[in-house]
Structure formats: C-alpha cells, structure tokens
Image: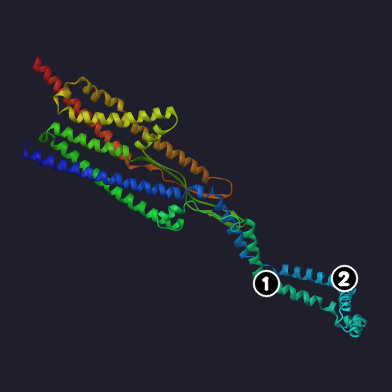
Amino acid sequence: MSVKGKILLAFVVLSLLGSAFLSWRIYWGQRELDRHALAFAELNKINYGLFNMQAWKLKAFEIFSGHITEFNISPSAYQEAEAELRKYLYSIYEEHIATGKLFARVFEDAEKNSKVNKMLLKLFKDNLQTQLQELNIKGHIPEMAVQLAAELKNNEPRFRQIMQNELVRLMQYKDKYVYVDPRLDQFKALGCEDLDCAKAKLNNSIDEKRAETNKHATWLMAILLLAFVLLAIGYKSIGLRSTIGLLTLFSVLLLLLGISLPMIVIDARLNSFVFNLYEQDVSFGEQVVFYQSKSILDVTRTLIESRGFDLKIVGFLILCFSVIFPFIKLVLSGLFLQYQLLRNSAVVRNMIFYLGKWSMADVFVVALFMAYIGFYGLFDAQLSSLEQNKGGFAVETVNYTHLAPGALFFTTYCILSIVLGIIINKWHLAANSMAEKLVI
C-alpha cells in the first residue's frame, strides 16, 4: 500500500473510531431524552386533566368560591329585606305585645316568684296598656327594620364566609375526602413539589438532551460523509478489500443505531381546552393525548412478549428481516473478499447475493415513511376535528409527531448496504469473468 493509501486509511479509521464514539454518545443521549420525554408525557396525561374528576372538582370549587367571594347584595335586596323585617316586627307586635300575651306570661312567672313585690307587680300590671300606648312601640318598628337591614349589610363579609364554609362542606372537599396526587413520587424524584416545577425541569432537560443529540448526529453524518468521500476517492490506493471492510463496519454501526434508536415519535396534545361556565372561563392547560416512542428492537420485543400468537409471528418476522438477516449479510459481505474459503462456499454466496433480497430493509424504510405519513395524517385529522367542534368550547391542539433519529440512521444504512452489495456483486462478476478467460 502506498503512503497516500496509508494516510487515507488512517483518516478513514480515525473517522470510524470517531463515528463509534459519537454513536455511543447519541445512543445514551437519546435514551435520556426518551426517558425525560416519557416522564413529561406521563405527568401531563389527559387522565390528570380533562379526564380527571378531581381536576373538575377543583375547577368547580374555584368557580363557585369566586362567585361567593364577589357576592354583593344589591340595594334593592336590602329594601326587600327591610320590608320583610317590618312585616315580621309588626306581626310580632300584634300577636305578642298588643294582645298582652308576652306580658301575661311575664307577670305569671313573676307571681310565682316569692322575691317579687306583689304590690309593685300589680301596679305594673294595671298600668301596662297605658304605658304601651305612651311608648308607641308600633311607631318605632319602621326605624327598627331599617337598623336591622343596615346590620345585615355590615355583616355581609361574614355571610360570604359562612357560604364558603358551607360550600366546602357540601362538596366534601376537606371533610370526608383527601385527594393525594398519584404523581407525588415523580415530583419528589425530580426535586419538586408541584407540576409546574416538574414540567419546567423536564422541559429544560428535554431541550438540552435534544440539542446535544442533534449536534452529535450532525457531526456523525458529517464524519460519515467525509469517510465515504475519502473511500470513493482513494479506494484504489487503499485497496478494494480494505474499502469493503471499512464500509461494512460503517454499515454495522448505522444498523445498530437504526434498530436501537426510536424510529417514529407519536406525540398528540391538547394545547388548551377552554369553555365558559357561569360566566367564568374554565381552562385546562397542555395535556398529552397520546405519546409513543419505539425503536425496531422495542417493537420487536413488545410483539414477541405479547399474548397473541399472530403478534409473536409478526415480531419474529420483523426481527429476522430487519435485524438478523441484515446483520448476517453485512458480516459475510465484509469477510467475502478477505477469505477465499468464503468465496468458494455456495452457502455464503447465496446468503450474500440472495439473503439480502429477503432482508427487505429498503421495503421496511418505505413502510416506515408510509406509517409516519399515516400516523401524522390520522392524528392531525382527529385533532383538527376536535378544534372544529360545535359544542361551545375552544380547543387548541398540537401534533408533535415526527421521525426520530433511528429513521435517519436506518435509511442511511439501507442506502449504504445497497451500494455495498452492488460493489461486491460487480467485483464477483469481474472475478468470475477473469477466471473464465484464464480457463479458456
């Protein structure tokens, strides 16, 4: 190998080592990102908002409590109260005072009491009617009604407090039922005491991890592109066998990333839900309707571990066509040019040239993009139908469904695998043609 070839080989090997390091960082960074994103989705599930009875109870309590706090008795109501008090006082006067029933009972009790002076008592009793007329109690009743109505107005804050206390008792909010948020352990794990703090911390972590993962993925793709350009330019200096071996290692790296990282992230949310109740807006903030982030390995594991036999078969087929067959093909392709024994083996040749057709990785990529388009369109249509409701409430929806890094790396692997297959096939045909000429 020439000096130029050695230098190019050294650069490509360094690129391979750098790609391996970046792949490791991307894998663990994506795992942290998925963990935080899943935690955020769990904390903000619609089950804890729009579909949570306790949340509705709190909203109702806030509405009625607010109405009671703002409760003011109108002047006309006090005028009606004053009129009713006047009627009540007049009825008391006519029934108990004017008829003498009240004083009759008082005198009767006094006569039974030995300490009361009987002569003085008789004097009061004989002059009662005259004194009542002189006092003119009936004439003072309108004034007393006005004073009582004014006293009611002065005690209005106390009435509001009594009504609030009765509302709490009626709703059994504090007396009989104490609600414990099932997310408290998650709050504590994040070092928080409430949802707002937990959401802020998770959002910061998600933004940091996503920026870091995107940066590493960009560097990885740039290094891969540089390595491929170097191999394309200097494959004659490096040697076809070394070139195939390096391309195989790059393909294995991309395959491992493609099957272990999430392919599609399905994230549908209600950004806000507002409706008016008793002239007051009732609103729910951001809620996650559906969230799912799965890699090929995750989907395969889920299907294989499911109870249905048909799902187990599908999981096994995905494992074979997307993981096992491609990996076997890559390993044999990388070793095919290195060892004459493998080139002479019909089994190995069939695996390389025919097994690749059965791996269907390119078909899987097409299916992946079709699934993405289908999921995105499905959720977008469903969320749009919610926004166009005619039920008197305002809904704002957000569809964050997107392709994840696994789709990028798996697609890149498919392209590189096809290129690798073409190169090996051409070399194999050229070698066979040369061998036939030598025989002739």
Q: CA distance from mark 2 to mark 1?
A: 29 Å
Q: x, y percentage for residue 405?
A: 32, 42
Residue 414 visible somewhere in the drawing: yes
Q: Which residue is mark 1?
A: 155
Quadrant containing the C terminus in the rendered view: top left
Q: Which residue is mark 2?
A: 95
Q: Residue at x 71, y 74 (%)?
A: 151
- Note whether 66 is above or below 107 in the view shown: above
* Residue positioned most to the right: 126
Q: x, y percentage for residue 209?
A: 33, 50
Say which element carries label 2: helix
Q: x, y percentage for residue 310?
A: 43, 27
Image-based side of 386 in relation to 165, left or right: left
Image-based side of 336 in relation to 83, left or right: left
Say which element carries label 1: loop
Q: Residue at x 74, y 76 (%)?
A: 147
Image-quadrant location for residue 261: top left
User: In this orientation, which residue lies closer to the viewer: 341 or 384?
Assistant: 341
> In the image, what residue type sits under mark 2?
Glu
> In the image, what residue type sits under mark 1?
Asn
Q: Earlier in the sequence, mark 2 or mark 1?
A: 2
Q: Residue at x 67, y 67 (%)?
A: 159
Image-quadrant location for residue 265: top left
